[in-house]
Every structure is written in structure tokens, then in C-alpha cells.
Amino acid sequence: MFYRSCSVMTLSALATVLAAAPVSATTFNIRASYYGSYDAAMQNKEAIEANFRHMAEGIYEATNGAHTLGKVTIYTDAAYNDNAAVVWVKECWPNAHINGLGSAGQRIEHCDIFPNGGNPMSFLEKNAPVAIP
């Protein structure tokens, strides 16, 4: 659920997106900070959720099921951008700190638009990066 300025969108269904993980799996619940307003987030809700589903699938596959993404709490209006696992900005070169989960100031930076060397791509179009005309 999305929250206006400290309101959240909780994506608890992500934990069940994938097949059942091993009993010893570690599930990470994370906080995300979205730069836009609540209304903007609601307009892009389906695409934002799809991006986090892709993240959940990547975590699961990269760890052979040892780690899963659980509850994702998304704050709008850049709330908690100094203390979120994922900081979502309008335009960036997606990047992350290595082994930063749970460490202050460490985050994954994600965005709506990836400049891609002068050929911008949108992470909100068709739930996957596509070239912007």
C-alpha cells in the first residue's frame, strides 16, 4: 500500500510470487522511497509493483531460493530516502552499494528513466525497460 508522505504501499504478495522457498530461506522486508507524489505513484502502481516483482525473482534466482523478498513498504514524496533499502528517483543510472542491506546510507538506486547513453529507457513502460521515442 502507498502512503502519502509517510504513507506506504505494502506489497506483501511478493513473498508468494515465487514457488515455495526452502525452509531455511531468509526473507528480507524492505523500505522503498519513491520520489513522486502519492497520486503519481498510484498512476504508475502496476509498473512499480512489476519492478519489485522482477527484483524478487532476481533475488530468489541468484541465491537458488536461499533468499526471498518479503514485504516492500513504499513511501512517497521521497520520505525516508535517507533510510530506505531502495531509493527511487526520476532519472538515474541504476546502482547500488555492495552488501549494503541494513547499513545506514547504503541503498539501491532505481529510477523511472535510465539515460542509457543518450537513448533513454523507461522502467515504467510495459513493465520492462523499453526505448523512449
Image: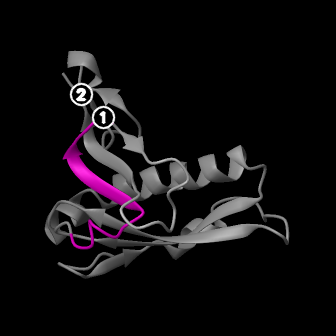
> Is residue 95 at all visible to an observer of this figure?
yes
User: Residue 24 appears in which quarter of the rendering?
Assistant: bottom right
Residue placed under numbered mark 2 in the picture: 115
Q: Name which residue lies at 69% across and 44% down.
A: 62
Among all residues in the image, which is located at the extreme right?
23
Residue under pointer 1: 93
Q: Main secondary structure of the magenta part?
A: loop
Residue 17 image offset from top left, x and y in percent = 63, 62
User: Label 2 amino acid?
Assistant: Pro
Frontmost of labels 1 and 2 is 1
Q: Is residue 21 left or right of residue 47?
A: right
- Over which residues does the magenta segment extend? 79-93
Question: Residue 82 location in percent, x, y?
Answer: 28, 67
Which residue does the image show at 27% across and 73% down from the upper left?
Answer: 80
Q: Are marks 1 and 2 in contact (CB under 8 Å)?
A: yes
- Between the C-alphas of marks 1 and 2, the distance is 7 Å
Q: Is residue 20 above or below residue 3?
A: above
Disc 2 packing (10 Å; few <14; some 14–19; many ≥20): some
Q: Amino acid at mark 1?
A: Trp
* Quadrant occupied by the N terminus: bottom left
